[in-house]
Amino acid sequence: MITLIKNLPDNIIGFRYKGKVTAKDYEKVLFPEFEKAHKKGKQIKVLWVLEKDFDAFTMGAVWDDMEMGIKYFRDWKKIAFVSDKKWMNHTVRAFGFLIPGHVRTFKNKKLEEAIKWLEE
């Protein structure tokens, strides 16, 4: 499941990933928020938080993730990826160079630091 993180600064959109993440989550939660930011002409600063109970992505979610990355390719400004899952942080760092914006990983206890980095 993906939920929108509320009460973030206006120029940041944030999401929490819990349990199993599906394509429906992307279509109902992520895509509308990215489309709003895109229509406003904003470069996207995004906060992704993987909760400790995050389990997996379905294949449909993986496909939608790639689609989102391509569709908004030129809109990315900063991505803060927050997780205690070492394999996810490693994967994000390994492929972060493919994104035109800045990508940085943080552990869950550094959530506030991640938000401050996005605000800069």
Image (cartoon, rainbow, N blue to C red):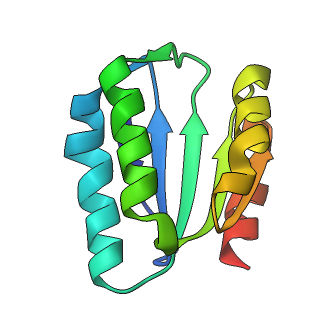
Q: Is residue 81 above or below residue 46?
A: above
Q: Residue at x 21, y 31 (%)?
A: 24
Residue 1 visible in the current orientation: no
Q: Is residue 26 above or below residue 111?
A: above
Q: Residue at x 78, y 42 (%)?
A: 93
Q: Is residue 118 above or below residue 58?
A: below
Q: Position of residue 58 (x, y in %)?
A: 37, 17
How many labels were placed on the picture?
A: 0
Residue 103 visible in the current orientation: yes
Seen from the viewer's position, the closer of residues 86 and 76 is: 76
Residue 22: image quadrant is top left
Seen from the viewer's position, the closer of residues 81 and 92 is: 92
Answer left or right for 110 relative to 15. Answer: right
Q: Residue at x 66, y 68 (%)?
A: 101
Answer left or right for 96 relative to 68. Answer: right
- Quarter of the C terminus within the rendering: bottom right
Q: Position of residue 113 (x, y in %)?
A: 78, 58
Q: Position of residue 78 (x, y in %)?
A: 64, 67
- Quarter of the N terminus within the rendering: top left
Q: Position of residue 106 (x, y in %)?
A: 78, 44
Answer left or right for 75 relative to 109. Answer: left
Residue 94: image quadrant is top right
Q: Residue at x 42, y 29 (%)?
A: 62
